[in-house]
Image (tube, grey):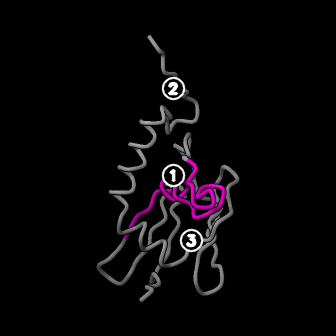
Amino acid sequence: MTRIPTAIQLHKASKVLSLKYGPDEEYRLPAEFLRVHSPSAEVQGHGNPILQFGKLGVGLTKVEPAGQYALKLTFDDGHDSGLFTWEYLEQLAQRQAQLWEEYLAELKAAGKSRDPSEQVIKLML
């Protein structure tokens, strides 16, 4: 059964989207986390995900409903495609720690950085 948050709040200063599912269940999803896990084809690559890097510090500028089933998120780096369904948002919330660790491991393996002003170069000695 798909659960819909009882409250959704954008915290622009801390760059966090909070989702409440009743009085005792709240998730705080950082904009960077949401950006690198966007359900858009640009990120998901039609079944072959494209590693997002350099997204440290990205924020959300707008959160709007998409019908009764999803949110459309607009990020300050211009990304605004892909609809975050209620089911997908709940999966991200519940698996946040695991997904973040996997993302950081993928970045490291690819020699990429979260910092947009940093370029990692591997020297072959």
| Residue bounds of the magenta highlight | 27-50
Q: Residue beneath label 2, please? A: 120
- Image spot of residue 24 (x, y percent): 29, 79
SS at circle 2:
loop
First reached walking from the N terminus: tag 1 or tag 2: 1
Q: Nearer the viewer, residue 79 or 30?
A: 79
- Image spot of residue 122 (x, y percent): 48, 21
- Image spot of residue 75 (x, y percent): 63, 56
First reached walking from the N terminus: tag 1 or tag 3: 1
- Image spot of residue 92 (x, y percent): 43, 66
Please report the residue visible at 55 percent of the width from the left and 42 percent of the height from the top: 53
Q: Residue beneath label 3, please? A: 84
Q: Residue beneath label 1, please? A: 32
Please report the residue visible at 39 percent of the width from the left and 56 percent of the height from the top: 99
Residue type pointed to by label 1: Glu
Residue type pointed to by label 2: Val
